[in-house]
Image: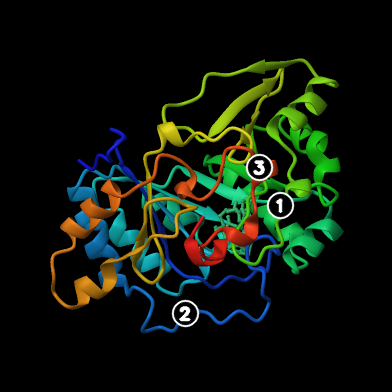
Amino acid sequence: MLFDTFGRIHNYLRISLTDSCNFRCHYCMPDENMACMSRAQLMQADEIIRLAEIFTGLGVQKIRLTGGEPLVRVEFPDILRRLSKLPAELTISTNGALLHRHIELLKDCGVRSLNISIDSLKPEVFHRITARDQFQIVWENIQLALQHGFGIKLNVVVMAGVNDSEIMDFVEITRRQPLHVRFIEFMPFTGNNWQSGSVLTAAEMLERVGSELDVVKLRDEPHATARKFKAVGYEGTFAFITTMSDQFCGECNRLRLTADGRIKNCLFGKEETDLLSALRRGEPVEPLIRESVLRKHAALGGQMSGDHQEVDASKIENRSMIKIGG
Ligand code: SAM
Ligand code: SF4
């Protein structure tokens, strides 16, 4: 088992399969011409499986594949099949554009829930945010995944003046469909032009929803990052990921493995430990994982205060989100 110095158990690993993507969301991949990792830098399929085995041996019970866009990795089917043999729940975060190609594979591999990002229900705004004219295919793939019985969480990064006028529209899609919308407070990462004025806090969003609908608070799952609600009589739910206004670090059970094989013990931490080089040299990796977990800060990677209005994004040392793996 992996415990940090604050007694938090770490049993959930996010593995980034690639830092490339078929979208260009400006809040995530700030530089359109960003150089992607070379093939030699990326963890190869065998290395991903070996590291995942080591993590499950240390008590990891859930693995999320992410990126970049995990579905653009050519070996995605092979990696998923092999990971599905490990004793861990398997899930993915995706932008949904390529989902139709993998539905049967996902079912075969026991994946039951998907996180799909969709920041606007208006094709032109969607295009502006992602730099891709792909709203329709993403929406159709959400419907396809629903028909196939996947549990679906829709991730919406809310940015003032960009898509905040659509909060009620997103809640509305939960009226007749079992969709779980998660409004994510906009977070600062290297190069993404984050400003505190662009953040809409969960409290502000909830006030907007509550002024139009009867809303009830639902019970949150253990270690959940999202605070869950439901509009009365609606089939689905909505939730807020409150990183910027009310951090939930005390419950954190997450570790991240970047596509180049570095463990990050926090999304906002600057510290990284290179597992891939150790693995390639034939050195033991477990002690490095344990040391990394023991170095974890109490909150927000030790780099931010809990008040987003005090955050100076230029002082945060980190990667861009696309190179971390969200
Ligand atoms: N490509 C996949 C996707 O879009 O879901 C997986 C990777 S993406 C980095 C994972 C999640 O991080 C997405 O839901 C995305 O919206 C979120 N994300 C990226 N940058 C963010 C930011 N600056 N603030 C909040 N969430 C962000
Ligand atoms: Fe790609 Fe996902 Fe980042 Fe958008 S949020 S650029 S889809 S990795």
| Image coords of residue 59 (percent x, y) | 22, 43
Q: Residue at x 78, y 58 (%)?
A: 126
On-image quarter of the N terminus: top left
- Colouring method of the image: rainbow
Measure the C-alpha gap from mark 3 to mark 2.
31 Å
Q: Is residue 192 left or right of residue 225?
A: right
Measure the C-alpha gap from mark 3 to mark 1.
32 Å
Mark 3 touching mark 2, by CB under 8 A? no
Instruction: Determine whether 89 is above or below 103 in the image.
Output: above
Report the number of discs. 3
| Image coords of residue 144 (percent x, y) | 62, 49
Of badges 3 and 2, nearer the viewer stands 3
| Label 2 sits on residue | 37
Answer yes or no: disc 1 within 8 Å of ligand 1. Answer: no
Q: What kind of residue is marked 3?
A: His
| Label 3 sits on residue | 308
Identify the image quadrant of residue 167.
top right
Of badges 3 and 1, nearer the viewer stands 3
Identify the image quadrant of residue 9.
top left
Measure the C-alpha gap from mark 2 to mark 1.
30 Å
| Image coords of residue 193 (percent x, y) | 72, 62
| Label 1 sits on residue | 139
Res 175 seen here: no
The kind of secondary structure element at disc 3 is helix
Taking depth in this image into account, of 311 and 96 the one nearest to the observer is: 311
Categorize mark 3 by other alpha carbons within 10 Å: few (<14), some (14-19), many (20+).
many
Taking depth in this image into account, of 182 and 305 the one nearest to the observer is: 305
Q: What kind of residue is marked 2?
A: Met
